Image (cartoon, rainbow, N blue to C red):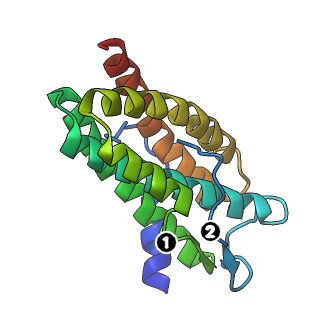
Amino acid sequence: MMVLAVIVLQCCRPTNKAESMGDTTTAVDQVVVNAPNAPGSEPMGDGIQTIMFLEKATLMASLETEWGKLAAEKASDIKLRDFGKGVAKDQTEIKVLLNAIATAKRLKLPTALPINEQERLGEMRRMEDDYFEKLYLKMSVEDYRKNIELFRGAGNSPDTMISNFAHRFLPVLEKHQLQALELRGDR
């Protein structure tokens, strides 16, 4: 457990470099609280805000990972395929670190997308490439706007593990939002 805490703290320390990398309003699977916060980590208020951030960020990372993989497979535009690959890679990293934080806090995060998101992903797989590309970019731009707001709020958390994580990945989300806007402008 001590090694995990060290990994989480190492991974969540603030960084200025922008590494390559959509709050949906969809319900997230139930989060189970197994025990109080891990020693040394301060809760955001009563801990509910921390749980809500972890839920939303996990859902966002899961959705963006799947959408990115789909864009990497389906897009005819090489720039969009590369963007999708980068998003999938970075969101996978975010998901791994969110799970490490949740483990350190003795929380269980959802492991599967909600059914309505799985259905939407299936619909996107069946779309014609042109329509898929436009929809993917539209959804990405909208979701990054919401997620940037979510991560900015989490950056002000008194829980240092959460605020450091948010500060580390906020530049990644901002970079991807700019890339999506640029790609969308090409259409």
* Mark 1: amino acid: Thr
Q: Which residue is mark 2?
A: 29
**x then y, percent, for residue 75:** 22, 35
Q: Quadrant of residue 142?
A: top right
Q: Which residue is mark 1?
A: 111
Badge 1 local density, few (<14 within 10 Å), some, or many (20+)?
few
Q: Are marks 2 and 1 in contact (CB under 8 Å)?
A: yes
Q: Nearer the viewer, residue 23 or 165?
A: 23
Badge 2 local density, few (<14 within 10 Å), some, or many (20+)?
some
- Disc 1 secondary structure class: loop
**x then y, percent, for residue 90:** 34, 49
Q: Nearer the viewer, residue 100 or 6?
A: 100
**x then y, percent, for residue 41:** 68, 69
Q: CA distance from mark 2 to mark 1?
A: 8 Å
From the viewer's perspective, tell me whether residue 18 is left or right of residue 150. left
For image coordinates 53% across by 62% down, the residue present is: 115
Residue 53 disc label = none
The answer to whether one can see residue 40 in this image is yes
For image coordinates 36% across by 19% down, the residue present is: 184
Asked if 114 appears above or below 86 in the picture, the reply is below
**x then y, percent, for residue 59:** 54, 56
For image coordinates 20% across by 36% down, the residue present is: 82
Quadrant where the C terminus sits is top left
- Disc 2 secondary structure class: loop
Q: Nearer the viewer, residue 126 or 90?
A: 126
The answer to whether one can see residue 174 in this image is no
Count of numbered circles in the view:
2
Please identify the residue farthest to the right as the structure is shown.
46
* Mark 2: amino acid: Asp
Asked if 5 appears above or below 80 in the picture, the reply is below
If you read the primary sequence from the N terminus, does the residue marked by circle 2 or circle 1 appear first? 2
Asked if 128 appears above or below 179 in the picture, the reply is below
